[in-house]
Image (spheres, rainbow, N blue to C red):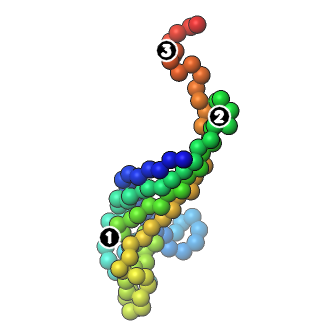
Amino acid sequence: MFIFAGIGAFHFDPKSGVGPNRPSAANLHGGVVIKSYPRYQVNVPYGLGLKWHLTSIFGLGIEWSPRKLFTDYLDNVSSEYADGYMQGNPRTKDWYFFYGMTLTMRLPNPNRPCFQNN
């Protein structure tokens, strides 16, 4: 079992509508500009995981990691918009979660230089 924490960065660009040619919805609600916000942000990832040695060569790992964000606009929803209706809670910031699985392979002869012929 392992635990981890760190600092990360991400870029987000919320889209409007459905399909491959969706316009950016950042800063818009109902076609009205509501607030400009930076789409490059910092986050704090932390979490826990498990690793198993399946064989002497292969291993398997799983992990779970919530990401604490410092923006409330990941989904382009916060506060009130032009129509006057509350669209989110401006007192709380957004979060997202990462679940992952890894398959690892141990390389043979780790102490042997790669240029050696034997």
Please, what is the three-letter code of the amino acid marked with disc 2?
Phe
Q: CA distance from mark 3 to mark 2?
A: 22 Å
Label 2 crowding class (10 Å Cα cut-off): few <14, some 14-19, many 20+? few
Horizontal relation, residue 109 to residue 46: left or right: right
Q: CA distance from mark 3 to mark 1?
A: 51 Å
The disc, 2 or 1, on the residue closer to the chain's N-terminal end is 1
Q: Position of residue 55 (x, y in %)?
A: 68, 33
* Foreground of the two, 103 or 22: 103
Horizontal relation, residue 33 to residue 113: left or right: left
Residue at the farthest right position: 55
| Residue at x 38%, y 59% (from the top left corner) | 43
User: Is 114 located above or below residue 82 in the figure?
Assistant: above
| Residue at x 65%, y 29% (from the top left corner) | 56
Label 1 crowding class (10 Å Cα cut-off): few <14, some 14-19, many 20+? few
Q: What kind of element bears circle 1? A: loop
Label 3 crowding class (10 Å Cα cut-off): few <14, some 14-19, many 20+? few
Q: Which residue is mark 3?
A: 113
Q: Which residue is mark 1?
A: 37
Please, what is the three-letter code of the amino acid marked with disc 3?
Pro
